[in-house]
Image: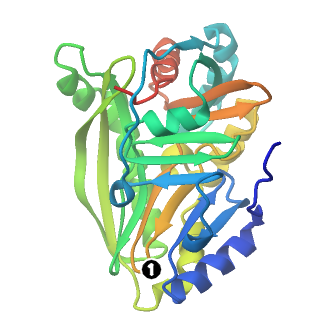
Amino acid sequence: MTETFPYILLKKQQIIQQINSLAALHTPFLFIIDYKAEQGYVIKQYELDDRFVRFENAKRKTQNAEHETILWQVLQLNIEEYRPKFDYVIEQIHLGNSFLTNLTQPTEVETNLSLLDLYKLGNAKYKLWLYNKFTVLSPETFIRINGQTISSYPMKGTIDASMPNAEEIILNDPKEKAEHATIVDLIRNDLSLVAENVEVKRYRYIEKLKTNKQDLLQVSSQISGHLPDNYLERLGDILFSLLPAGSISGAPKSKTLEIIENAEGYERGFYTGICGWFDGENLDSAVMIRFIEKIGDKLFFKSGGGITAQSDLQKEYEELIQKVYVPIY
C-alpha cells in the first residue's frame, strides 16, 4: 500500500507568510521552494517525518550508509539536440538581451540505486530527499544568515581536477573570469535589496568536489551584508526578493529568465530552486543543483552551465555532461 504524501504544496504568498510568522516566533522549519519561486513547502521541525522528507546540512549531518558496487549509466543528450538551444542563447546574447544565461537540460540516467539510496550514500554539503519525487546532493550554498549577517556563495566555474595545472587553467580562463565576475556583481546587487554594507569578502576561491566518476574543482566567492534589526519578521520576503538565484539564472535577470524559458524546452520544477533550514535563530540554504528527479519510472539528472559571448558549444556540452554525477565515494 502506497503511503500518502502528507505535506501541502503552498503558493508563493502562503510560503512568505508561513516563513515570516515562524521566524518571528523562532520556530525551526525546513523550506523547499521551486525555481520559479511560485510554490513549495514549509515544514515545521516537529512535523518532519523521515518516511517522506529528509534534509541534511553541516549542522544536521548523519552517518553515510555503506554501499556495494554502484551502477551509473548516463544516457546523454546528443550534442546535435543541444546545439539549437545553445545557438538560441548565443543569438540572444549577441542581440544584447543577456550577457550571461544559465542553460540547463535533463539527462536520463540508469542506476541500481533508489532516490533514497542516493540520498543516504551521497557526500554533499546539502542533501534533500523528497518521497518518490527527487533527491538533491548540492555543493552550493544559496544564503546563510548568522545574527544579522547575510552571506551568499555563488559557484561558477568547473574543471576536471585531474587535468595538469587545473587550478591555474580555471582561474585564468577569460570566459570563466568574465562569467564569475558577472555573477558576483549580480549577487551583490541582489543582496543590496535586503541588506546594507554589502561587500565581496572572498573572491574566486577553489573548492574540490569528489564524485563517483572523478574529482572536480569549482570556483566560488563570498558576498556578505548586514540585515536590519527586525529582519526575522520579514524573512520570507527577504528570501523571495533574491529569487530565482542569480547563479542559476543569469544577467540581467528578468530578461534572461525569458530566454531560459524559450531555450530549454522543459520545466525545471524544483531543480535550481532553493531548500534550507531555519534553526530558530539562523538560516542555512542551498541551491538545488546535482538534482535527480523521478518522472514516471525513469530517473533524470538535471544539469547545466553559464553561457556567455565567449562560450564554445563543445566545451559547454561537455560541462553539462561532466556535471551528471553523484558525490558517492
> Residue 84 lies in what quarter of the image?
top right
The quadrant the C terminus occupies is top left
Q: Nearer the viewer, residue 103 or 30?
A: 30
| Residue at horizontal 53 percent and vertical 78 percent from the top | 235
Colouring chosen for the image of the structure: rainbow
| Residue at horizontal 23 percent and vertical 32 percent from the top | 171
What's the amino acid at mark 1? Answer: Gly
Number of residues whose C-alpha sits closer than 10 Å to that of mark 1, classed few (under 14), some (14–19) or many (20 or more): some
Query: Where residue 118 sits in the image (x, y, percent)?
Result: 51, 33
Local SS, label 1: loop
The quadrant the N terminus occupies is top right
| Residue at horizontal 29 percent and vertical 26 percent from the top | 173
Q: Which of 162 and 134 is in front in this view?
A: 134
Q: How many marks?
A: 1
Would you place residue 271 above or below residue 176 in this image? below
* Residue at the disc numbered 1: 280
Query: Where residue 133 sits in the image (x, y, percent)?
Result: 70, 41
| Residue 102 seen in the figure | no
Would you place residue 111 above or below residue 37 in this image? above
Query: Where residue 274 sits in the image (x, y, percent)?
Result: 55, 55
| Residue 126 seen in the figure | yes
Query: Where residue 187 sits in the image (x, y, percent)?
Result: 43, 58
Q: In this view, does 265 lie to the left or right of 178?
A: right
| Residue at horizontal 46 percent and vertical 28 percent from the top | 326
